[in-house]
Image (tube, helix red, strand yellow):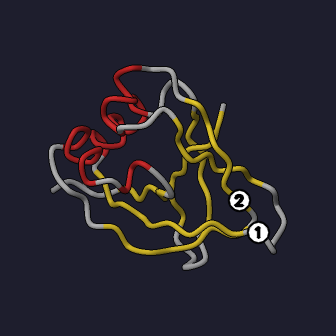
């Protein structure tokens, strides 16, 4: 396998059916936490994304900067090609940013546009 890139997932990217749809495999997930953020909800309108996830409401990572706020999730180690697939899946409502997790790991995360 190529070098991997971590994605911090707190929602539908953790679902095995979404991983199999996007990456063709289940991706092992390592628990981690992002401080300075909380979860909201984003309404999804793209039928392809709704079909893959089974829902039109997806969690939305809201960066607050408040150290009292935190979001539990996990990191998925994906290849560059799989990261492109995740970008495509998240294209309608999200943009990708880099975050530093409680573990000290730097990872990609998707936040609302």
Judging from the image, what secondary structure is the residue with disc 1 in? Answer: loop
Q: Quadrant of residue 7?
A: bottom left
Q: Callout 1 environment at 10 Å: few (<14), some (14 to 19), or many (20+)? A: some
User: Quadrant location of the N terminus?
Assistant: bottom left
Q: Residue at x 37, y 56 (%)?
A: 14
Q: Are marks 2 and 1 in contact (CB under 8 Å)?
A: yes
- Seen in the image, is 55 located left or right of residue 101? left
Circle on res. 69 = 1
> Residue 9: where, in percent of width, then height?
47, 57
Q: Residues within 10 Å of mark 2 (few under 14, many from 20)?
A: some
Q: Which residue is mark 2?
A: 38
Against 30, residue 75 (above or below) is above
User: Helix, strand or loop at disc 2?
Assistant: strand
Mark seen at residue 41: none
Residue occupying the point 62% across, 45% down: 60
Query: With 32 as the anchor, is 16 left or right in this view?
Result: left
Which residue is at a point 26% across and 66% down the rendered structure image? 28
Q: Quadrant of residue 42?
A: top right
Residue 79 in picture, x, y percent from top left: 28, 49
């Amino acid at each position: 396998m190529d070098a991997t890139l971590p994605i911090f997932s707190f929602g539908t990217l953790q679902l095995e059916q979404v991983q199999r749809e996007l990456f063709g495999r289940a991706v092992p997930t390592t628990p981690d936490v992002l401080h300075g953020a909380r979860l909201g909800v984003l309404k999804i309108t793209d039928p392809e994304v709704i079909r893959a996830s089974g829902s039109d409401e997806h969690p939305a990572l809201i960066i607050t900067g408040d150290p009292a706020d935190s979001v539990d999730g996990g990191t998925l180690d994906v290849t560059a090609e799989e990261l492109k697939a995740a970008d495509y899946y998240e294209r309608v409502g999200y943009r990708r940013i880099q975050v530093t997790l409680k573990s000290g790991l730097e990872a990609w995360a998707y936040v609302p546009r």
